Image (cartoon, rainbow, N blue to C red):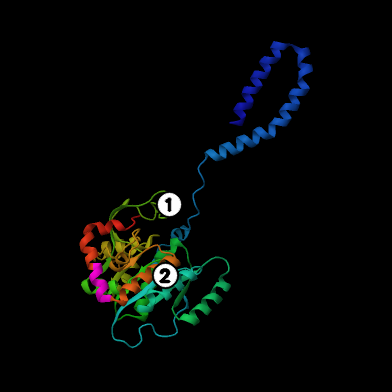
C-alpha cells in the first residue's frame, strides 16, 4: 500500500519537473526534501497501523497439540498420577450409595468451591476434581494441601488443567469413582458454577431409576469450526460436522452399573476436546448403544426469572457466580423449611404458568 502511494507521488513529481523547468526545481527542491523527511515517519506509521487494523486478530492459542501426539485415553490415564485425595474413604463401608457428586473445578476457583460447600454440598457427598494450573505449581499444591486438610474434599491429579483437557479430567472422575465408590447407584458429574437442588435431584433419580445416562439432551448440534470459538473442534479431531445427540456437560447422571463398560469402551475411542460429546455421544451412545434420557430439570442455563419456584423446580442451574449461588440457595432453603407449604405453592406456580415456565430460562 505504501509503495503504491510513493510510486504515484514520484510520477507526479517527475511530471511537475518537466512543467516548471530546472531553475525553479533547484529553488523548490530543499523545502520539498524537508517536507518528505518530516512526513515520511508519519506516513509509514499511518500505513502500518491502518493495515494492521484491517487484518483480523490472530486466533487464540488453543492448547490442542497434545492430541496430535496421542489420542489414546489409556496413554494419559497411565501417565497421570493422583497427588491429593480425601483421607477418609469416600463411600465408607456402606453397601450402597445413592449418588456421588464429582465437581469439575480449577485451582484458582477457591471462592466458587467455597460457595458450593456453603450451599448444596452440605446435603450430598461431593468432591472437587482438578489438575495443575499455571506456572507456580509448587505454591498451588501447598494451597491445595491446606484446603484438602481443612475440608477433605479435593482430588488433584498431575495434569495441566485447562478447558481443552476436560475430557481427561472427566475420565479421571469416572475411573476414581470405579476405584473408590463402585457401589454408587449414580455418578453426578457437574461444574463448580452449578447450583444443585439436592431435593429435586433426588426426585429425578427416583423417577429414572433405570436410566443409563440422564441429563439435558442436545440434538442435531453443529460443531464449531471457527478457531475463535470457545468450543472449536478442528476437523482432524472429529470429522463429523453434526452430532445427533449428547448430554450437556454442565450436569449429567451416569448409572453406576454402566461405569465399567463406559471406561472399557473409552480406551478404544480416540480422544477429542469436548468431554460431553466424547463421553455421552461417542462412547456411551455411539460405541455402546446406551440410551441418553432427557430431563430438562438438569438445566444447562439459569433462569432470568429469579423466583423461588424456578429454582425449586430445577435439579441443577448453570453459570452462577458465588454471590448468585448463595442468593439462590437462600431461596431454596426458605422453601425447604416449609416444604409441604412450599410444594403446594410451587405446584400451583407450575400449574398456573404451565409451559410458560420454560421461558423463564435463559438459553445459550
Assign a secondary structure to mark 2: helix
- Using the image as rendered, state which of residue 303 and residue 225 is in the foreground: 303
- Using the image as rendered, state which of residue 199 and residue 213 is in the foreground: 199
Looking at marks 2 and 1 on the same chain, the residue that comes earlier in the sequence is marked by 1
In the picture provided, is 333 more to the left or to the right than 20?
A: left
* Disc 2 target residue: 326
Residue 48 at x, y = what percent? Answer: 61, 37
2 or 1: mark nearer the eye: 2
Residue 305 at x, y = what percent? Answer: 33, 59
In the picture provided, is 20 more to the left or to the right than 315?
A: right
What segment is highlighted magenta in the picture? 339-346
Indicate the quadrant containing the C terminus: top left, top right, bottom left or bottom right.
bottom left
Examine the structure image and report whether residue 344 is included in the region drawn in magenta: yes
- Mark identifier at residue 83: none
Indicate the quadrant containing the N terminus: top left, top right, bottom left or bottom right.
top right
Assign a secondary structure to mark 1: loop
Label 1 Cα crowd, 10 Å radius (few <14 / some 14-19 / many 20+): few
Residue 91 at x, y = what percent? Answer: 35, 83
* Disc 1 target residue: 229
Place residue 127 in its image quadrant. Answer: bottom left
Q: Is residue 53 above or below residue 34?
A: below
Place residue 155 in its image quadrant. Answer: bottom left
User: Residue drawn 71% across and 27% down?
Assistant: 36
Residue 275 at x, y = what percent? Answer: 37, 63
Question: Are discs 2 and 1 less than 8 Å apart at CB?
Answer: no
The dominant secondary structure in magenta is helix
User: Residue drawn 76% across and 18% down?
Assistant: 28
User: Residue drawn 67% across and 34% down?
Assistant: 42
Whole-Å distance between the Cαs marked 2 and 1? 30 Å
Examine the structure image and report whether residue 157 is included in the region drawn in magenta: no
Q: Is residue 324 above or below residue 56?
A: below
In the picture provided, is 114 more to the left or to the right than 353?
A: right
Amino acid at each position: 500500500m505504501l509503495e503504491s502511494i510513493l510510486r504515484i507521488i514520484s510520477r507526479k513529481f517527475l511530471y511537475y519537473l518537466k512543467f516548471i523547468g530546472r531553475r525553479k526545481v533547484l529553488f523548490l527542491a530543499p523545502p520539498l526534501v524537508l517536507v518528505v523527511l518530516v512526513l515520511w515517519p508519519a506516513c509509514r506509521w499511518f500505513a502500518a497501523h491502518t493495515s494492521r487494523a484491517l487484518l483480523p486478530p490472530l486466533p487464540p492459542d488453543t492448547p490442542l497439540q497434545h492430541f496430535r501426539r496421542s489420542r489414546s485415553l489409556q496413554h494419559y490415564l497411565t501417565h497421570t498420577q493422583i497427588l491429593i485425595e480425601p483421607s477418609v474413604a469416600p463411600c465408607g463401608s456402606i453397601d450402597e450409595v445413592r449418588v456421588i457428586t464429582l465437581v469439575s473445578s480449577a485451582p484458582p476457583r477457591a471462592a466458587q468451591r467455597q460457595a458450593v460447600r456453603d450451599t448444596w454440598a452440605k446435603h450430598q457427598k461431593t468432591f472437587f476434581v482438578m489438575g495443575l494450573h499455571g506456572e507456580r505449581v509448587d505454591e498451588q499444591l501447598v494451597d491445595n494441601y491446606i484446603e484438602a486438610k481443612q475440608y477433605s474434599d479435593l482430588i488433584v491429579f498431575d495434569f495441566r488443567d485447562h478447558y481443552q483437557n476436560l475430557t481427561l479430567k472427566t475420565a479421571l472422575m469416572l475411573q476414581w469413582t470405579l476405584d473408590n465408590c463402585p457401589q454408587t447407584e449414580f455418578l453426578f458429574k457437574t461444574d463448580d458454577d452449578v447450583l444443585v437442588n439436592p431435593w429435586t435431584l433426588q426426585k429425578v433419580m427416583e423417577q429414572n431409576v433405570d436410566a443409563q445416562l440422564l441429563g439435558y439432551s442436545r440434538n442435531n448440534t453443529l460443531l464449531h469450526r471457527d478457531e475463535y470459538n470457545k468450543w472449536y473442534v478442528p476437523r482432524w479431531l472429529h470429522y463429523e460436522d453434526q452430532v445427533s445427540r449428547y448430554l450437556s456437560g454442565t450436569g449429567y447422571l451416569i448409572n453406576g452399573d454402566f461405569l465399567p463398560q463406559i471406561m472399557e469402551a473409552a480406551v478404544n475411542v480416540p480422544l477429542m476436546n469436548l468431554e460431553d460429546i466424547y463421553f455421552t455421544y461417542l462412547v456411551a451412545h455411539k460405541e455402546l448403544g446406551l440410551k441418553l434420557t432427557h430431563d430438562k430439570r438438569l438445566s444447562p442455563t439459569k433462569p432470568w426469572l429469579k423466583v423461588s419456584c424456578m429454582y425449586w423446580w430445577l435439579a441443577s442451574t448453570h453459570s452462577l457466580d458465588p454471590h448468585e449461588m448463595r442468593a439462590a440457595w437462600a431461596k431454596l432453603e426458605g422453601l425447604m423449611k416449609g416444604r409441604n407449604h412450599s410444594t403446594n405453592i410451587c405446584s400451583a406456580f407450575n400449574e398456573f404458568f404451565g409451559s410458560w415456565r420454560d421461558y423463564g430460562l435463559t438459553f445459550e
